[in-house]
Image (cartoon, grey):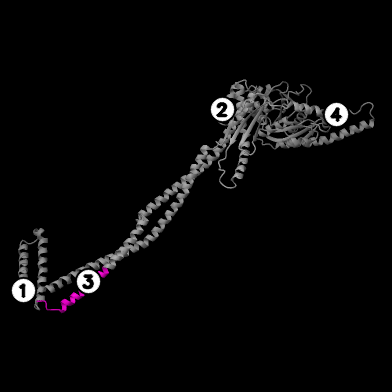
Amino acid sequence: MYESKAKLQFELNTDGSLSLTSKSLQLFEIGLMFTDLLEIARIKRVMENLQLNILIHSFKTDKLYKINLINDLYTKEELISRAEYLLENFQTLNMQRPIDVVINNTMIKNNLGVEDLSKRFSISRIGSSKYINVSVEDKDPYAAKFIIDILTKAWIKEYRYEVKQRYKDKSESIAASCDRAHDELLMLYDSLRDFQRDQNVIDIEATKKFIIDRSAELKKEISKGKKELASDKSSIDFLGNTLENKKDFGFKSESDEIHLSIMQLKDSLRKLQQEREYNAYNLEKLPSDYLDRIDAKISRIEIRINAQLSKSISSTTYDPSLTKQSIVNKYIQDQINYVKLEASVKTLENELYELNNRSRNNIEIIANIVKLEGQIETKEKYYLNLLEKKHFAELLEKESGNNLFVVENANFPIKPKSSKRGLIIVGASMGSMILILVIVVLRIIFDAKHHLPFQIEKESKIPIIASIYLLPHLDYLRRFKPKFVSKLQVWRQEYKRKQVHSQNIDSRKYLRRLILDLDDNGKNIISFVGARSNHVTLHTLLELQRMFDRTNLKSLIIYNDWFTPLPKTGNDFKRLEFKNRDQFTESGILDLSQEEVSPYDLLLPDDWFKLLVKLRKQYNYIMIITPPTHKSTIWHEWLNLTSDVFYVYELHETFDEEDAKNQDYLIEQHCNIFGGLLTSTVK
């Protein structure tokens, strides 16, 4: 045996310096990861990848294995094309496709099945490290290296596929959440902007600063204006009192009346002048002498004003007093300033009132804005966190699976693996006598054959649901034997025969009930699969057929065990020939046992399906006896045409690994497995 080895390394994505206990956690995570990797290495897709590569390389070259086809349904080129297609598209064998069934059966027949290949390689971790040893043993050094190369590549590819799928799902979920958070954040931004525009509050800090500063400025100006008003009020009161009580300003007592008359005349003159100026553009609508009359009025008033002025001058004893004139000017100026200041203060107070109202209204507006800004800030943090996770997930998805890689490629074994021949020779020479004695004792104690049902059930995977025993007719009347002994033996045989007969009837009825419980619209094509040729199976099916005939149910038995062909004469059943298959109408046996022939030798799978569908219209049930599994693999072909299966056990025979492997194959198929039928023909 030649042994080829390769070394792989796997890395963790976590940092060993995260915490004080991270070292132990890291070792624990490494152990879990190694367990996962070990399971991935033996999953179906990896092993089938190895099988398909072996199939392709063996058919294309002569350097690997010599693979014999189990039938001629497909050529080597067709099998190679199908295998390459499966590898390119990263798919597994589909047992619903006949070509995939042929590939699987071919590999199993040539001892290259999944279980066979799994036994050839071993995977072990080097101590507590992150390194993995992979070794393969084979009789051919080239095959050992080829298998380990393909195995490591398929293993790494499957691991990266699994990890990428896991991170891809997470990345897509986080990206969807990130997009939703981004849309919600934009909606909050739009809501805040529209609300600020509607309320005319763009900048909260600037608005608050403006209100505070303007309020303080207005209060300051109002205070200053009120002080000036008080000052002007005092001045006006003082000047008015002075002008009212003090008369000695150089004027006669009638000067005030003259002055008042002059002022009235001035007002009349101003009104006439304004009227003349206003109507100057509408003369065509007025009388033709309008200007002459209004000019005459203006002239008369001017004459009166001049007369009053002359009178005022003539009534003055001396020049007007500059003091009174200045007091009058000051008095009038103070009154004007007072009115202006009063109006200004009132305006400022109104503005302050409106500013206070606006400030009170802005409290609720600002509170809503602050609330929206808080929601935006929270949503921004959430969005940024999701964005960070999204980038991290995308990075992990991009780099996932790269933490498992080959550090030492498979070596080409130059010499066979050491067999420790010297130690074996010494051990054999020292313990030969003991070994012989042990073999003799074990030979006596242990028997490979199973003589009791529980021995079969202990190793089998399909439970026993019924048992049928056929006892042979033995002649106990022999010479030199006492008669009472012969009679006793005959009585014992008849007693056992009665017990077995009642049990057999009950078992056959139970089998009939199981078959009758099948759906009438189903296939109802039942195969009886066993490891060896067994006439009890045929006897049981004939009894079932007779039971069906008594209830007007037609059934067809297909007998394909050419290792024990049906006798051509002296039969108590109706024999049917395959060439007359279109004329079958009565219950009977379709005999395919006279020559070594498989179903696919007679018809292609599609034609068989059509024939069975046609036969099901004539027969309620079709029962098939396949060739023994120990001698032929043709039972695989019958299994592809079958809907239900009984597995036939035999007492006093062995149940080995090949039988267990065949049962595993049965369980993995699409068929409905009723259970096991235990048979016996030994005394």
State the residue at coordinates (17%, 77%).
242
Quarter of the picture containing the C terminus is: top right
Range covered by the magenta-colored residues: 225-250
> What residue lies at 92% left-to-right and 32% top-to-bottom?
487
Q: Give the residue pinned by disc 4.
A: 473
Q: What x and y, as percent, mark residue 407?
A: 58, 32
The quarter of the displayed image where residue 634 is located: top right
> Of the residues under marks 3 and 2, which one precedes in the sequence?
2
Q: Which mark is residue 85?
A: 2
Comparing labels 3 and 4, the label whose residue is closer to the camera: 3
Q: Is residue 228 above or below residue 608?
A: below
Q: Nearer the viewer, mark 2 or mark 1?
A: 1
Q: Nearer the viewer, residue 250 or 377?
A: 250
Disc 3 marks which residue? 232
Q: Are marks 4 and 2 in contact (CB under 8 Å)?
A: no
Q: Earlier in the sequence, mark 4 or mark 2?
A: 2
In the figure, is residue 476 to the left or right of 606? right
Disc on the earlier residue, 1 or 3 = 3
Looking at the rendered structure, the secondary structure element under dot 1 is helix
